[in-house]
Image (cartoon, rainbow, N blue to C red):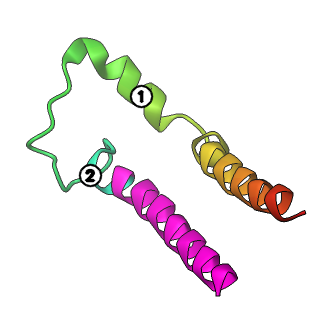
Amino acid sequence: MQIILILLLYFLLLKVIIFGYLASYLYVDIASYLLTYSLFTYPNQVGLVKGHIGVTLIIKVFPIIITIVASFTAIYLYYS
């Protein structure tokens, strides 16, 4: 029973991580047209915006990968 609860909680954890990753692109990303007229970028800060867009995908996904690997490592170390 306890392992089922742990698996369900990790399933929810993965859903929250993925949803947060996708929501950040939907609502905050500069290429998004959802909030086009509500987000203002000061002209002096355009270099920061271009820097955010120019970052490769592996660098953006790396924290998610570390989180997932660390959580499974913690479970393994706890039960071994």
Quarter-of-image position of residue 74: bottom right
Q: Please report the residue visible at 55 percent of the width from the left and 67 percent of the height from the top.
A: 14
Quarter-of-image position of residue 77: bottom right
Amino acid, disc 1: Lys
Q: Is residue 70 left or right of residue 52?
A: right
As helix, strand or loop, the secondary structure at mark 2 comes to: helix
The dot on residue 4 is none
- Label 1 belongs to which residue? 50
Segment colored magenta? 1-24
**Identity of the residue furthest to the right in this view:** 80
Please say whether residue 13 is one of the residues in the magenta stretch.
yes
**Identity of the residue furthest to the front in this view:** 1
Magenta stretch: helix, strand or loop mostly: helix
Q: Nearer the viewer, residue 25 or 54?
A: 25
Please say whether residue 26 is one of the residues in the magenta stretch.
no
Q: Please report the residue visible at 19 percent of the width from the left and 19 percent of the height from the top.
A: 42
Task: Determine crowd level at label 1: few under 14, some 14-19, many 20+ residues with C-alpha closer than 10 A.
Answer: few
